Amino acid sequence: MLRNKLPGIGTTIFTVMSKMAQDHGAINLSQGFPDFDGPQALRDRVVYHLEHGHNQYAPLAGVPELREQIAAKILDLYGCAIDPDNQVAVTPGATEAIFCAITAVVHPGDEVIVFDPAYDTYEPSVTLNGGVTHHIPLLYPDFHIDWQQVHDAISDRTRLIILNTPHNPTGTVWSEQDIQSLRKVIADRDILLLSDEVYEHICFDGKEHLSLLRYPDLAEKTFAVSSFGKTYHATGWRVGYCVAPRPLMADFLRIHQFINFSTNTPLQHAFADFMRDCPQFHRELSDFYQNKRDLFCELMGSSHFSLRPSGGTYFQLADYSAISNEPDTDFASRLTREHKVAAIPISVFYKHPPDQQIVRFCFAKQDDTLREAAGRLVKVRGQG
Ligand SMILES: Cc1ncc(COP(=O)(O)O)c(C=O)c1O
């Protein structure tokens, strides 16, 4: 008899909706990936390294040149000096980094706090390690954290809090007030932090990304995770990284070595070259995506969806309560079948989905794709 280790968990919504989009010939604004390539200069460096003998196992923690570039960027942006030899691990995507960090520190019976709607890898990674997730809903309509609830949820069993700013799917970006509140709730407690910062370079309206690496007292308890896929329009390359204090990184690497051992070698060399030669790329990414957010929101202005402009990430939530009161999974499915635009229903990111009519659109798309999609979405009207 097979005993399922993740009962109740099926195929991820991203795979489900992308397949539905394909089956129905819909524009895919569901799964989060660009419909354009990353910079030519970066792709050229991949070819260069493929042709120049960088085709065998990389070191366990990643190629030194890339770890040095990551450390240099973190010093430049967040004023945090990390040791590239002992505090960085390059991983096959942020997904693996999240799994390794959780596996490194969560023991059976440990409690982990997550905020709903939560990215869908957190809970299964905790469950597989025998941990228990404690879900705290972000508060509608701006999806902020209720820190009193966090305070009340913390117990002696709380081992880890998983944070995500800028936040997928809501686009919420942390404020200094959140940092102060976090500091307060974990004061004098043996609680670690997993800071999912994969959208660190996509923050809008002049807001700065508040990486936990900016705050030495928090950084010393933090696994900070990022993704080259998000930053360089290359989600399919599967390269991300984790930064942590030495003892946490040592535990992290003990896990990582038995999951993937190391990460794609030529890609790591290419990223190292590109980060060294084109540091402006990540600095300009917020403006690049803010233009797309603005275009999408403007195009949707005459629709019956209601949009609060996203504060960061490449996602935009849309409230469709003026169109229908269908559950969001039904609505997203109908939108794909009948109107040929695929979106993500956000209820799937909740333990206890609230009664709300909201779907998520990905605007990491060429402007023409956004125009075509919005042209279809403005025609979606209520039945009544
Ligand atoms: C919040 C969040 N964390 C982690 C990931 C995973 O990143 P990667 O594709 O590098 O594994 C994603 C990807 O969509 C994400 O949105």
Image (cartoon, rainbow, N blue to C red):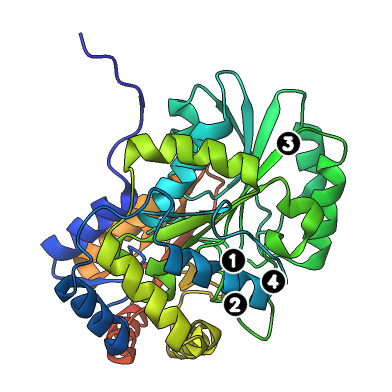
- Mark 3 vs 4: CB contact within 8 A: no
Of labels 1 and 4, earlier in sequence is 4
- Mark 1 vs 2: CB contact within 8 A: yes
Q: CA distance from mark 1 to mark 2?
A: 7 Å
- Element at label 4: helix
Ligand 1 picture quarter? bottom left
Q: CA distance from mark 2 to mark 3?
A: 27 Å
Which mark, residue 78? 4
Crowd rating for badge 1 (residues with CA inside 10 Å; few <14, some 14–19, many 20+) = many
Give x and y (percent) for residue 90: 43, 56
25 with respect to 225 (left or right): left
Quadrant in the picture for residue 365: bottom left
Residue at mark 3: C-beta within 8 A of ligand 1: no
Q: CA distance from mark 4 to mark 2?
A: 15 Å
Which mark, residue 166? 1
Asked whether residue 294 is in view, the answer is: no
Quarter of the C terminus within the rendering: bottom left
On the image, numbered disc 3 is attached to which residue? 191
- Element at label 2: loop
Q: CA distance from mark 1 to mark 3?
A: 22 Å
Give x and y (percent) for residue 137: 64, 46
